[in-house]
Amino acid sequence: MIPVTEFRQFSEQQPAFRVLKPWWDVFTDYLSVAMLMIGVFGCTLQVMQDKIICLPKRVQPSQNHSSVSNVSQAVASTTPLPPPKPSPTNPATVEMKGLKTDLDLQQYSFINQMCYERALHWYAKYFPYLVLIHTLVFMLCSNFWFKFPGSSSKIEHFISILGKCFDSPWTTRALSEVSGEDSEEKDNRKNNMSRSNTIQSGPEGSLVNSQSLKSIPEKFVVDKSTAGALDKKEGEQAKALFEKVKKFRLHVEEGDILYAMYVRQTVLKVIKFLIIIAYNSALVSKVQFTVDCNVDIQDMTGYKNFSCNHTMAHLFSKLSFCYLCFVSIYGLTCLYTLYWLFYRSLREYSFEYVRQETGIDDIPDVKNDFAFMLHMIDQYDPLYSKRFAVFLSEVSENKLKQLNLNNEWTPDKLRQKLQTNAHNRLELPLIMLSGLPDTVFEITELQSLKLEIIKNVMIPATIAQLDNLQELSLHQCSVKIHSAALSFLKENLKVLSVKFDDMRELPPWMYGLRNLEELYLVGSLSHDISKNVTLESLRDLKSLKILSIKSNVSKIPQAVVDVSSHLQKMCVHNDGTKLVMLNNLKKMTNLTELELVHCDLERIPHAVFSLLSLQELDLKENNLKSIEEIVSFQHLRKLTVLKLWHNSITYIPEHIKKLTSLERLAFSHNKIEVLPSHLFLCNKIRYLDLSYNDIRFIPPEVGVLQSLQYFSITCNKVESLPDELYFCKKLKTLKIGKNSLSVLSPKIGNLLFLSYLDVKGNHFEILPPELGDCRALKRAGLVVEDALFETLPSDVREQMKAE
């Protein structure tokens, strides 16, 4: 016997592939085994037993006299003798004898072989071999897509990922949490999905409906009591699985080779089934038990006609009918498979039932080969698809990231990053994380939260635990916010800073922060778009006092005018884009501070002169050359700070003397050559910065500035300082470095409050020992070459070095 196991290689595949074998493939595999056994059994009988047994036919007497003698002789030779009659002496002895043929064993074997080849029908001879070949073809067709390189690699990869997803502790945890919802919660979720109320909650402009904002955190906010259920290693493995699933999906969804291969092999099986049924039905009757054989071997055997018995004809006939039944069932199953392939849309797969059952609403539908394999798996066990879907959900992935974040960023580790910011608040900066750790909301002393380059930030309702939180910074972050968290921020947030790449990415919920006092917007727009893009209305920001816009807008946004009645400080940093149409400034009657930086202004805007409450004006980095309009500042009685630095101003008009209320004046980084004496009639000036110009002479009228505390002429061309300068006895900071000075007057000792002196970069050969009279001046506050410092008396040096 030939063992069936010898044919295992034709249908053998990895045991894990069974998940891609639906019931009809399993059924046809069993049918193939049954047909294979028929073929093997028939072939074994062919080999082990005699195929045919033949005997010469008896020849009838002929009327031809010429052959009477021959026939008589033949008859005589073949006619058996009558049995002997029993004698009275031996009545029981009777010998039975057949017809005599005078043929030996070799002649019979020769006759059997000749008749088998000449007389027996080919179907009767090769039936078991045909069954065997057809069955092997069926088995090859059924498993070819598991063997073909282009498809087997995808299948192996898919099965590998599927098994890991099925066994992952993360899958079990995610499904167990959502399965804990009661029916009422599920009904509420279904009802909420039909509502049209939405809240825009991300800089990317996506709409998040109210159901998502409420239900997702309830189901997916990490439960701190169970956070240890998934250790760090398991979390990293689940994270790697998410990445593998993403890459595999992108790769597999590009083509449909698996679907095409399966369809083709099924069509081939149907065609073969039709062929087998057609010719077997016609030829099964050719398997006969008795066969007449007429072969011309009379000269070798003495006979020409033989009557043969096909010893396996009866068995083969039964086997052929049985085989036809199996093939018919096999073919009908293949026809059903074709119906399933073409009736259903197998190139698309919807996880709708999983979304409804689990409540994970963001599981995407898939297509092409990915969809086809999931359809096949559903025929095996739909649970595989359900567990696999967890790794297609962005919400599930974010939850896993959240869990890993919580494990990585413990409250103690976060407290180590706390620092004091420019607003003197306790701040926690988080940069380039995968999300916002929930442990942040355990640091109740936190006053400022700064998030930079963090995607998919979800601000949960637990932010309400931060009772001291007043400041929030979002730099290039996409943010979604829970409705309860928004309510908390409306009541508590005082300062909001947003850095964006496009104004359309601004968080829309910021327009409802009614208690917000300071708003800082930093972003970049294309020049063409900025002419048409405007901020949404800020009128609901009733408490807004400070607004800073660092962008490249071409005009003051109308939204700013909406808060003009209570706005106290406005800063526009325009990145070189020309700012025009400044008439809206006139409406900001309560404005006390105004910064128009890098706005390509060529003249001081006339609208500024209408701001009677203005106290500080900064026109840094513009294109100002002439400031004759400065005379109009005399109407701004409250103006105390004027910064016209980093421009191209060549001279200071004499009208400057009318600005008697000025206390701080900055003309640094200009092209001023001459200082008018009228400048020093502004006798309230405490801060005067004239650095980085082309000034050669300091008028002696500088001594009039008795309130002067800060004076800088760094990087000019001054050759000498007037002695009147040392009459400014309140001077604390004096910067005269990088000039052409050669002598420092001993009268510098009159500046008793001097704590910072920069003389580096001049032509001094010696420092006056009177510097020792400046008791507030220490070595750290004296900027000078080391060699020049050594020219001071040792006791002065020791005095300066002393703490």
Image (tube, rainbow, N blue to C red):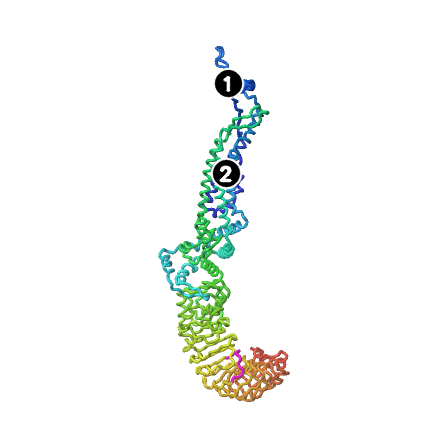
Instruction: Identify the image quadrant of the C terminus.
Output: bottom right
Q: Residue furthest top?
A: 89
- State the residue position of label 2: 36
Q: Residue at x 45, y 77 (%)?
A: 569
Q: CA distance from mark 1 to mark 2?
A: 46 Å
Q: Toward the viewer: 265 or 647?
A: 265
Asked whether 54 falls inside the magenta stretch, the response is no
Question: Residue 446 at x, y = what percent?
Answer: 45, 68
Q: Which SS type dominates the magenta stretch?
A: loop
Q: Toward the viewer: 62 or 412?
A: 62
Question: Residue 132 at x, y = what percent?
Answer: 52, 38
Q: Is residue 323 above or below residue 238?
A: above
Q: Are there few (<14), some (14-19), or many (20+) residues within 10 Å of tag 2?
A: many
- Of the residues shown, which amino acid type is indicated by label 1? Met
- State the residue position of label 1: 96
Asked whether 621 falls inside the magenta stretch, the response is yes
